[in-house]
Image: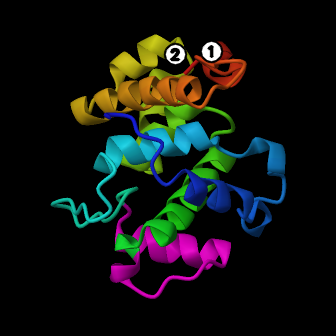
Amino acid sequence: LRLPNAYSQYFDIALSNVNLSATEPQATVDNRVTKTFAMAIARQESAWNPMAQSSANARGLMQLLPSTAQKTAENQQLPYNGELDLFKPLNNILLGTAHLNELNAKYPNNRILIASAYNAGASRVEKWLARANGKLAMDEFIASIPFFETRGYVQNVLTYDFYYQNLQDKEKLQTFSKEEYDRLY
């Protein structure tokens, strides 16, 4: 009950229609975020409440800020008719997964950095990476994230992703990608 396969078809639709070439020509179809990762983000963000609204005005299943939704819609040529669209599950998932794919273009196949940026912003992640200066292993980097909320967020999302892989009967469960494990942060 805590990890339902909620809105599964919407994630299939959203992830099959992502226009990666709009902002990153080098991105390829094989380099998309996975359904299980996107669902893990939604689970962590809203606990599957499509009407969730944060004190920062993030809205819907994937807790998008209206400004992020507007920018993502423009970058990816997706429909966005204002803040109320973010309470519509399909619209929210379309925009949320498109934003995740934009972050994946910046941090290829690295869910640690993508989740950190989704939660705290890419500019903060860049500062944390600069501070770490390429000297930290994956677990050390996560432990060094200065925002307690973001540190827990990343840990939860990685855990939820693994659970969703298992719940969706993935044949080869992935704990960490090569890009995550081998990188010095």
Where does the image place residue 22, in percent across and percent down from the top left? 75, 69
Where does the image place residue 95, in percent across and percent down from the top left? 53, 66
> Is 179 situated above or below 123?
above
Where does the image place residue 171, in percent across and percent down from the top left? 72, 20
The three-letter amino acid code for the residue at tag 2 is Met
Q: Quadrant of residue 51?
A: bottom left
Confirm whether the magenta stretch covers residue 26. no
Q: Residue at x 32, y 62 (%)?
A: 50
Q: Is residue 150 left or right of residue 126?
A: left
Q: Nearer the viewer, residue 11 or 114?
A: 11
> Is 74 situated above or below 131?
below
The three-letter amino acid code for the residue at tag 1 is Tyr
Q: CA distance from mark 1 to mark 2?
A: 6 Å
Q: Is residue 60 left or right of residue 68?
A: left
Q: Is residue 45 left or right of residue 21?
A: left
Question: Which secondary structure lies at badge 1?
Answer: helix
Q: Main secondary structure of the magenta part?
A: helix
> Is 159 situated above or below 34?
above
Number of other residues with Cα within 10 Å of mark 2, as a class: few under 14, some 14 to 19, many 20 or more: some
Where does the image place residue 119, in percent across and percent down from the top left? 37, 46
Mark linked to residue 181? 1
Q: Residue at x 55, y 50 (%)?
A: 8
- Residue picked out by circle 2: 138
Q: Quadrant of residue 67?
A: bottom left
Tag 1 and tag 2, C-beta contact below 8 Å: yes
Q: Residue at x 64, y 19 (%)?
A: 174
Q: Residue at x 63, y 40 (%)?
A: 107
Which segment is the magenta one? 64-85
